[in-house]
Image (cartoon, helix red, strand yellow):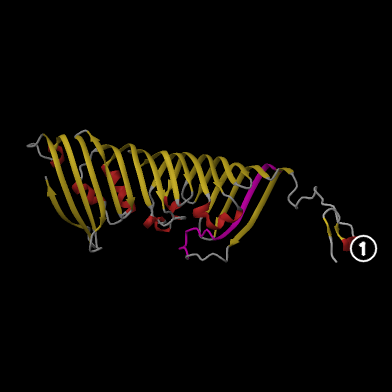
């Protein structure tokens, strides 16, 4: 009969004189030893990461495919590199590379840190094909290495930008519908979250010669820009209408600069309020302060029922508004205005067609 002795094993072990092996409590799985290197130079390196198990939609040229990285012409110089306690630190003196999609990192230098939960760049300078990024830090958080296969949802980014020039063609690398958008902006502020849910409590954005915006923002749904939901709190917006026209038309090509010139006076604005929705369905409310008077507004734009154009609905309330300036008429002075405007905008091969209704 087989008998088990809790301290010595089975009786068969005694019969055949088989002693149980003691447990080696000092054994550790293999890993990189701690090390330090003063200077590392790598030239013409090629890195490929293909996740064959991921069903991905084919991306147009110029747009990043998160599941299939193909980086080449990688040149990098590192100094003060140290690997200790499963943490890697170094100074990236220079790094350049290209991706098969056409995206190129032309210059990068930073202090670098990596462990099992985070990759972090401190004092970052990055210049790519279109933009120049300065950041006090740029981090990518994760729970395990495989999270890179679901970059959009599982990698939590953080960045504190200053004096950063963002060209929307860089955004287009990650959001294909924006890859031909040439809008540029200067950014200061902190942004956190995964790509699908980016947020900033206080972001300063400057565009053109006259637009200066302080805004709180939440953006949910990237990289699919068509279904992405935006929520903006306009803390302090200073701009002029021609630049507003340029900004809006860069996201909605059917809206032309000439359209705004016909219906909106060319004045400097200060705006405080909110806006939320998608690119195709936007609602906004707030107060516009100008030298010709203050205006409270509610506005919404959405696709019309036929799907050919857009409906725009605007409600305006104002006191002491300089109607003469708006209408370019000396016969009118300051007055009180309460009105609702409904406009149907139909794109045509030559310009735009307006069907409008005014209630006041």
In the rendered image, residue 60 lying in the magenta stretch gets the answer yes
Q: How many marks?
A: 1
Q: Is residue 42 in sight in this rendering?
A: yes
Q: Quadrant of the N terminus?
A: bottom right
Q: Nearer the viewer, residue 26 or 59?
A: 26
> Where does the image place residue 11, in percent across and percent down from the top left?
88, 61
**Residue appearing at x 19%, y 34% in the figure:** 293
For mark 1, what is the residue? 15
Magenta: predominant secondary structure element?
strand
> Where does the image place residue 120, in percent across and percent down from the top left?
58, 43
Q: Nearer the viewer, residue 36 or 268?
A: 36
Residue 83 horizontal side relative to residue 62, left or right: right
Which of the 4 image quarters holds residue 5? bottom right
Which of the 4 image quarters holds residue 267? top left
**Residue appearing at x 65%, y 46% in the figure:** 77
**Residue appearing at x 65%, y 42% in the figure:** 90
Furthest toward the left, the residue is: 331
Q: Residues within 10 Å of mark 1 (few under 14, many from 20)?
A: few
Which residues fall within the magenta stretch? 58-83
In the rendered image, residue 215 lying in the magenta stretch gets the answer no
Q: Is residue 208 in sight in this rendering?
A: no
> Where does the image place residue 123, in percent across and percent down from the top left?
56, 38
From the viewer's perspective, is residue 60 above or below residue 41?
below
Q: Nearer the viewer, residue 225 or 201?
A: 201
Q: Quadrant of the C terminus?
A: top left
Q: Secondary structure at mark 1?
A: helix
> Where does the image place residue 300, in percent across and percent down from the top left?
25, 50
């Amino acid at each position: 009969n087989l008998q088990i002795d809790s301290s010595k094993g089975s009786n068969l072990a005694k019969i055949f004189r088989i002693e149980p092996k003691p447990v080696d409590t000092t054994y550790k799985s293999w890993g990189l030893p701690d090390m330090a290197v003063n200077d590392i130079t790598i030239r013409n390196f090629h890195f490929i990461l293909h996740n064959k198990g991921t069903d991905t939609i084919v991306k147009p040229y110029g747009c990043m495919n998160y599941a299939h990285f193909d980086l080449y012409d990688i040149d990098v110089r590192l100094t003060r590199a140290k690997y200790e306690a499963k943490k890697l630190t170094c100074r990236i003196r220079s790094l350049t590379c290209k991706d098969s999609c056409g995206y190129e990192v032309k210059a990068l230098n930073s202090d670098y840190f990596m462990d099992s939960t985070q990759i972090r760049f401190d004092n970052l300078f990055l210049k790519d094909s279109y933009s120049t990024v300065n950041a006090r830090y740029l981090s990518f958080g994760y729970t395990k290495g495989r999270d890179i296969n679901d970059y959009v949802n599982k990698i939590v980014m953080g960045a504190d930008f200053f004096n950063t020039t963002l060209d929307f063609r860089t955004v287009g690398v990650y959001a294909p519908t924006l890859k031909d958008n040439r809008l540029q902006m200067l950014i200061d502020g902190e942004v956190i979250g995964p790509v699908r849910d980016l947020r900033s409590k206080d972001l300063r954005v400057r565009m053109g010669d006259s637009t200066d915006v302080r805004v709180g923002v939440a953006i949910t749904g990237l990289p699919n820009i068509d279904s992405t939901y935006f929520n903006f709190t306009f803390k302090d917006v200073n701009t002029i209408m021609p630049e507003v026209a340029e900004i809006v038309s860069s996201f909605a090509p059917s809206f032309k600069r000439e359209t705004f010139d016909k219906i909106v006076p060319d004045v400097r604005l200060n705006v405080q309020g909110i806006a939320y929705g998608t690119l195709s369905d936007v609602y906004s409310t707030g107060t516009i302060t100008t030298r010709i008077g203050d205006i409270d507004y509610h506005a919404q734009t959405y696709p019309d029922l036929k799907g050919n154009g857009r409906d725009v609905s605007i409600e305006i309330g104002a006191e002491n508004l300089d109607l003469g300036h708006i209408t370019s008429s000396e016969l009118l002075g300051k007055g009180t205005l309460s009105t609702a405007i409904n406009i149907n905008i139909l794109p045509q091969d030559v310009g735009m067609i307006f069907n409008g209704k005014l209630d006041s």
